[in-house]
Image (cartoon, rainbow, N blue to C red):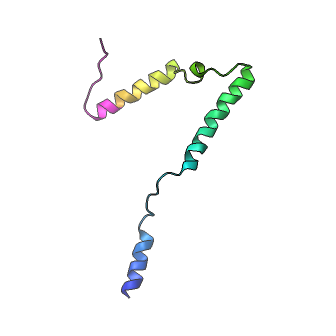
Amino acid sequence: MRGAQRQQDRWVLPPPQRPPRKAEGIVATAPKLARIIHGMIAGQKAYGENEAFKVTPSAQAHRLQHLHQQAAKLGLQLVPAM
């Protein structure tokens, strides 16, 4: 009877967390490479690392807003550097 109870307990517990596999990084990188290649073909431009990783003003504003939210959760306030 005790063995049956242990079997039921095992079914209720969530599966153990597994470490990320190497393939997940490759899968995550593929769409970024596809965007870069599509931009090169569509715009007929050579690859430029400065252009590929340029931070847009909207992305920077979004990042700053997220940083303000994180600081507020911690009870902190961001002030501009002088």
Report the residue at 45% width, 63% height from top: 15
Q: Is residue 51 above or below residue 28?
A: above
The picture places residue 18, in percent across and down from the top left corner, at 46, 57
Q: Is residue 46 left or right of residue 59?
A: right
The picture places residue 3, in percent across and down from the top left corner, at 39, 84
> How many marks do you count on the picture?
0
Please state which of residues 33 and 77 is positioned toward the viewer in this rendering. Answer: 33
Q: Is residue 19 above or below residue 45?
A: below
Predominant SS of the magenta segment? loop
Taking the view exactly as shown, the residue that stands out farthest to the left is: 75
User: The N terminus is located in which quarter?
Assistant: bottom left
User: The C terminus is located in which quarter?
Assistant: top left
Q: Is residue 43 left or right of residue 51?
A: right
Report the residue at 65% width, 31% height from top: 35
Please state which of residues 21 and 68 is positioned toward the viewer in this rendering. Answer: 21
Report the residue at 31% width, 15% height from top: 81
Taking the view exactly as shown, the residue that stands out farthest to the top is: 82
Q: Is residue 3 left or right of residue 37?
A: left
Q: Is residue 79 magenta?
A: yes
Q: Quadrant of residue 42?
A: top right
The picture places residue 56, in percent across and down from the top left corner, at 53, 20
For the magenta stretch, what is the residue range? 70-82
The picture places residue 9, in percent across and down from the top left corner, at 39, 74
Report the residue at 27% width, 34% height from top: 74
Taking the view exactly as shown, the residue that stands out farthest to the bottom is: 1
Q: Is residue 66 magenta?
A: no
Q: Quadrant of residue 29?
A: top right
